[in-house]
Amino acid sequence: MNKSLTGFTLFELIVTVAILAIVATLAVPSMNSWQQNSKIRSASNEITHFLQLVRSDAIKTGRITTICASQDGATCVTTNLTNWNTGLIARSTSLSASTEEVRAALSFDNNSQLNITGPASIVFNTVGAANDRYQIQVSMPDRETYSVCVPVSGRVEKVLGSTCP
């Protein structure tokens, strides 16, 4: 009985590896773009969730709550107020007392390409309404832009693009 050996020749193996290398080379730029867009979506989702949580807390506790940019998670920044890249805090004041406390904090990883701009502050009253219309933009150069929109009603919404409805 003669058994024939089956398998790949060295030439077939080299051609297969070369084709895989070409496909991988073509996929890397697309993967990088997808990863950056994912960071933008993730940051805008985190901001949306944070604002919804803070609004809900303002309604539940009956406290006026202010959201502002923060570097240390305890105090609002005093310069460059619209740069929200460092993080956010929510401070609340009770109607019966003049004391303030930090109710929630959100920080972002130090990604120098991620650009988050927002108003100097956002205020939710005791019924969850905002005192003005607000827009927070999350973007990267040459990538998607998401906007987190807060109308006067206080209902937080995330939209693709740089314009709130």
Image: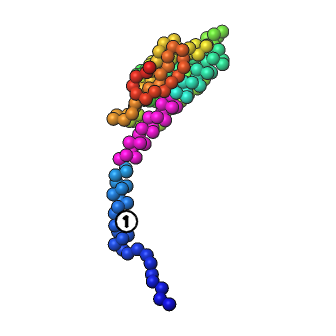
Q: Is residue 102 visible?
A: no
Taking depth in this image into account, of 57 and 41 the one nearest to the observer is 41
- For the point 45% across and 39% down, the residue is 38
Q: Residue furthest top?
A: 96
Q: Which residue is mark 1?
A: 16
- For the point 59% across and 16% down, the residue is 128
- For the point 41% across and 40% down, the residue is 36
- Quadrant occupied by the C terminus: top left
* Relative image position of residue 64 (x, y in whole percent): 59, 14
* Relative image position of residue 29 (x, y in whole percent): 35, 47
Q: Is residue 58 above or below residue 4?
A: above
Q: Residue furthest front?
A: 1
Secondary structure, magenta segment, majority class: helix
Corner quadrant of residue 103: top right
- For the point 66% across and 17% down, the residue is 61
* Relative image position of residue 20 (x, y in whole percent): 37, 60
Q: Residue furthest bottom?
A: 1
Q: Is residue 92 above or below residue 32?
A: above
Q: How many marks?
A: 1
State which region is magenta: 29-47
Q: Residues within 10 Å of mark 1 (few under 14, many from 20)?
A: few
* Relative image position of residue 126 (x, y in whole percent): 61, 13
Q: Is residue 126 magenta?
A: no
What amino acid type is highlighted by mark number 1? Answer: Thr
